[in-house]
Image (tube, rainbow, N blue to C red):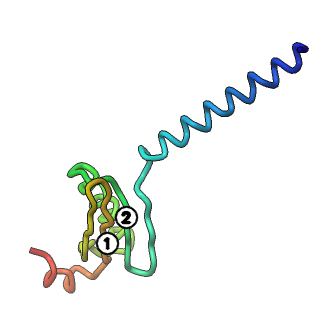
Amino acid sequence: MTVHHLDYKSKVLRAGCLFALVLTCAGCANPLVVMQGNYLTYEHPFTDADAASVRALAERECKWRKQVAVRTSSTCSLTRCTTNFQCMAPEEAKQYQQ
């Protein structure tokens, strides 16, 4: 084996390790978001902290539109949740907020 060949193998190994690390950390990143008009959908882990985090993200997004976020539904498995919000005018949102 030549020195060049060993360098290539070590580069491939490093790239593979980096790729595995990126995939591992993908779960640590922001939740999946789908935005369509005034509707926001977040997919996130089933924890209180992540539920609060997506609520804050929805509130921030709606605030840019001068609206408020109203949670319209949330469906969870034992590990993941899908939570839907709708951005509404503050007057309209009052009837949906508790």
Tell me if mark 1 has few (under 14), some (14-19) or many (20+) residues whose alpha carbon lies within 10 angstroms of its own: many
The spot of residue 67 in percent (x, y) is 30, 76
Q: Judging from the image, what secondary structure is the residue with disc 2 in?
A: strand
Residue 44 location, quadrant: bottom left
Residue name at image x 55 percent, y 40 percent: 22
Q: Which numbered tag is attached to residue 42? A: 2
Is residue 39 positioned above or below 23 on the image?
Answer: below
79 with respect to 9 (left or right): left
Is 92 situated left or right of 41 in this image? left
Q: Secondary structure at mark 1?
A: strand
Task: Look at label 1 and name its amino acid.
Answer: Asn
Q: CA distance from mark 2 to mark 1?
A: 6 Å
How many numbered marks appear? 2
Q: Is 20 in front, or is 95?
A: 20
Within the image, what quadrant is residue 55 found in?
A: bottom left
Q: Amino acid at mark 2?
A: Tyr
Residue 46 tag number: none
